[in-house]
Image (cartoon, grey):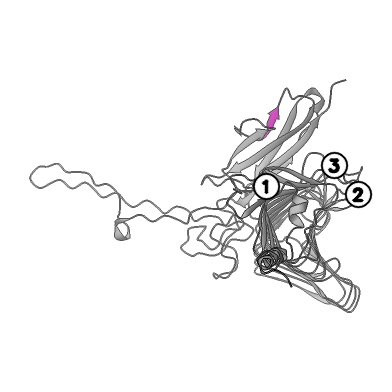
Amino acid sequence: MTAPRLLLPACLAALALLPASASATTFCVPTFSAACPDDGTTVAQASLETAMSTSGSDGTADTIVLGPGVFSTTSTFTPTGTDALTVVGQGAGASFLTSSSGANVFVVSLTGRGPTLLRDLSIVVGESFPTDNGSALNADAGTILRDVEVELRNPPSPGGTGSYGLTFNGGISSLERVRIAPSGSGALATALDVGSATPTGLTATQLTIAQPRVTAIRAESGSPVTASRVVVLGARSTAVLARPATVTLTNLLLTMAADTPPVAATSPSATASSVTLDHATIVSSAPGATTPPVGATAQSTGGATVTVTNSIVSGFAGAGQRSATGVGPARIALSASHVPGVVGAAGPGSTSATDMVLSAPTFADPAGFDFSLAAGSAGVDAGTPGTASPTVDLNGNPRVVDGNGDGTAIRDIGAYERPAPPPAPAPQPSPTPAPGTGTGTPGTGTVPGPGGGTMAGPADTTAPETFRRGGPGSRLRRGIATFRFGASERGVRFQCRLDGGRVRTCTSPLTLRRLRAGRHVLRVRAIDAAGNADRTPLVLRFTVPRRR
């Protein structure tokens, strides 16, 4: 018989072996910090990969807080488990996820796990990846990227396409304030690849894509993609491709650097394909352009449709091309837009153009990449009447205002809404002499508003996007680099920081002299008149060769 005095210790030992009750875990990587203090519930973990594979299926959501710095894996970051996971850094340009792999892999893979949020960090495809290979992220249902910068540093082969950005397959995911761009000698092939294997839903807002060599947004397998406030700069091939899919883009600025149709809906099967553009500004800088701006191609029984409303198209040959080589129809529908030229047509389908704006809208500063409408532009108050969505423009400013001051608020066409002109000043009252003195006190010329206050317009809370226009130039061997950059808003100022130096006010073009041989990093951010600073600064990496 067991002695009674041994019973309590035995029970305590058994209890110690039982699993603890599930509770959310916050991992501080690589250690505790001001952003992730030791409060008794947090866990310091030196390895990000270990944090990603711990307590992933205990039934409670987990959080990983990254400090500033570079977090690198030899292959792919692959969180395990089915619990919801949040990985938060200290800001894009401060916390980096990258891989030193020399294989064609993803930096981060989120497939087959629970909902995952990545925010306030950068994902970098490094120079170790194979030429024209490597991708930043592969994900499926429940993935959210918020305030994330995807940076491609891998140089392409001669005439090659570069590395890839984000791939989504299955379920519904979303992007908020995401920037995808090459840096240094890197190149971007396709920025967003949606549904290449299975139908996939994707929503995005405030998305910036720079210099894609293949496509900016490619959707397949009948996938629905909806995005608003999208900037695509310097595309070299078809930027928006639905094959087959349903793509809807609102408040889009798209600039083309090559003579290629920027938008295409193609159906090679029984599944219909469509691209809908509302409030788009599409501009080609390719000299002597010979291609149309939009194309609809139906190759089988599925139809292909491109719909363009409230938009501006400039610098292309013709208004579009539709082609149906099968039973399915090819359609192009244009309305309340400036799309010069005619639509070429072949095969079943239809073409329509209603309420078109014939005069070419003028831009504020196209040479400076400012494609907002100039004063008196034909695009002001030229869109469809009414107050339906969208209610803001590309910059987040109110969408339906009286831009020409005629007393009627009608939406502008294109990505930007021109602000209403300031009201005429109130007439100054004539001075009235005081009785019996022959002199008086002049009036103030002000008219009190309701309640004695003043009326202020909506506050501007939208930060500008900073983008690269050129550089570093051909004088690197002499220790001289020249960069040109711009912003998605006019009237901004810029701040620059070279390597670990001080933040300084700068202007474009910026010439850096007496650079030492080796690698350098220049960060540039735009700040608008309201004080909103770009949260994902432009990162320019370059190498100064040693002099021989």
| Residue placed furthest toward the top | 548
Task: Name the residue at 19% across, 43% down.
Answer: 441
Q: Is mark 2 on a helix, strand or loop?
A: loop
- On the image, the x and y values in percent for residue 396 come to 57, 57
Looking at the rendered structure, the number of numbered marks drawn on it comes to: 3
Q: What element carries label 3?
A: loop
Please say if 103 is above or below 62. above
| Residue placed furthest toward the left | 436
Q: Name the residue under label 3.
A: 127
- Label at residue 92: 1
- Label at residue 103: 2
Q: In which quarter of the image is residue 221?
A: bottom right
Residue 430 visible at all:
yes
Q: Nearer the viewer, residue 224 or 95?
A: 95
Asked if the residue under mark 1 is in contact with the one under mark 3, i.e. CB atoms within 8 Å, the reply is: no
Please say if 51 is above or below 503. below
- Between the C-alphas of marks 3 and 1, the distance is 19 Å
Residue 177 visible at all:
no
Give the amino acid type for the residue marked by disc 2 in the picture. Ala
Q: Residues within 10 Å of mark 3 (few under 14, many from 20)?
A: some
Give the amino acid type for the residue marked by disc 1 in the picture. Ala
- Between the C-alphas of marks 2 and 1, the distance is 25 Å
**First in sequence: mark 2 or mark 3?**
2
**In the rendered structure, which segment of residues is drawn in magenta?**
507-512
Asked if the residue under mark 1 is in contact with the one under mark 2, i.e. CB atoms within 8 Å, the reply is: no
User: Is residue 509 in the magenta section?
Assistant: yes
**First in sequence: mark 2 or mark 1?**
1
Q: In which quarter of the image is residue 524?
A: top right
User: Is residue 511 in the magenta section?
Assistant: yes
Image quarter in which the C terminus is found: top right
**First in sequence: mark 3 or mark 1?**
1
